[in-house]
Amino acid sequence: MNNKMRFGIFMPPFNCPPTQNPTVSLQRNIETIQLMDRLDYDEAWVGEHHSAGTEIIADPLTFIAHVGAVTRRIKLGTGVVSLPYHNPLWLADRAILVDHLLRGRLMLGVGPGALPEDATMIGLQPADLRPALEEDLDVLVRLLKGDEPVTAKTARYDLRNAKTQLAPYQSPCFELAVAATASPTGPKMAGKYGAGLLSLGATTKIGFDVLAHHWNVLEDEAKAHGQKVDRSQWRLVGPMHLAETKKQALEDVRYGYEQFCEYTQDTLALPTFRAVGKTFEERIAWINETGLGVIGTPDDAIKQIQRLVEQSNGGFGCYMMMQHDWANWDATQRHYELFARHVMPVFQPSHRRLLNAEKSARANHAELDALQAAAIQGATDRYVKPDARGAKA
């Protein structure tokens, strides 16, 4: 596994409350990724949702195609496309197009769909989605490989000798990743196809309990299907807001944290991610005292990520912060800057080299300081002292 951990953002997006101007919210989502690009974050993953009034990006491929034109290097992924909602042929075609437009910065994340109303509006039930994902992922992988035309019929589509006319820009293909929460379904599919794993519930209580087990399931499934996988393909997601002090972080999130909690409790039909409590203090405890995330300082964030590394039993490739509007825009930008300046380097080789360079300089400080002082004094003495002919040296 590469020893340089990557960092990024997972953007559903949580634009709470829905009374915000949606056009302005979308622009702020774009500017968030632009900021992260400037701060040297590695990845941004954008979700697909169609209901509930808060997660307002309907097509992450369209969104990241636009963002790709206004960023330089950050990789952009769908986090995730709800695969059962789409004809896999047209999804493969659109993804390949975006891969070309991004010149190889695309990552394609897929999942079953998180908001049940999204599914029911097109005649699907939540119980249908995970079996459909397994069915459709097999078709999608074959279409992306392009080895032969694909014929496949389900209740939702009928493909006959289907193929994409473009090959992916990346060779042999862009990275494919599968979303996972608490169940082993995601790790099993990721292992079967040699795909990456997006652990969306990794910092929940049940997520902690199964964290290392998820990777074991993935490795076993990969071995059974002759696939090669690497922990660098494993991404963990968790919420954070950082400030210089914990007191300031708590004050920052008074801006929008409670509206976010109310969204998870009363609007978002997702039992695995639901705020606890009715008071501000109880809801803060849901994040800080359960290990779910961090509202605090960069040191708190470092401890959280170190704990995740230990509980993963071998490490992972990327930590992604969950996007939210807990704080106002100024405090949010400061949060991302603090994380980039003080948290990211701790988990990257440059940090160790810089600290070793400082340690070496400190260890030799007295000796080198004396030699430097003597050299300066010697040069001064030679300049002011006349030589044998009466001229200054």
Image: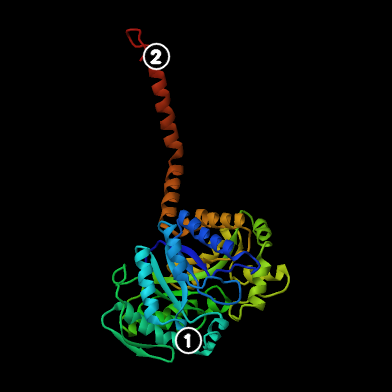
The answer to whether residue 306 shows anywhere in this view is no
Up the image or down, 77 lies above or below 82; here it is above
Q: Quadrant of the C terminus?
A: top left
SS for tag 1?
helix
Q: Quadrant of residue 296?
A: bottom right
Indicate the amino acid at tag 2: Lys
Residue 345: image x %, image y %?
A: 47, 56
Up the image or down, 378 lies above or below 270; here it is above
Towards the viewer: 97 or 362: 97
Residue 334: image x %, image y %?
A: 57, 54
Q: Which residue is mark 1?
A: 130
Determine the CA span between mark 2 and mark 1.
88 Å
2 or 1: mark nearer the eye: 1
Mark 2 burial class by Cα count in 10 Å: few <14, some 14-19, many 20+: few
Q: Quadrant of the N terminus?
A: bottom left
Mark 2 or mark 1: whose residue is earlier in sequence: 1
Residue 311: image x %, image y %?
A: 50, 72
The answer to whether residue 112 shows anywhere in this view is yes
SS for tag 2?
loop
Q: Residue at x 56, y 71 (%)?
A: 56
Does the CB distance between marks 2 and 1 fall below 8 Å?
A: no
Q: Is residue 267 left or right of residue 169?
A: right
Up the image or down, 252 lies above or below 82; here it is above
Seen as rendered, the residue at the extreme top is 390
Towards the viewer: 256 or 65: 65
Q: Residue at x 44, y 29 (%)?
A: 373
Up the image or down, 284 lies above or below 270; here it is above
Q: Which residue is mark 2?
A: 385
Seen as rendered, the residue at the extreme left is 147
Indicate the amino acid at tag 1: Arg
Residue 161: image x %, image y %?
A: 29, 86
The label on residue 229 is none
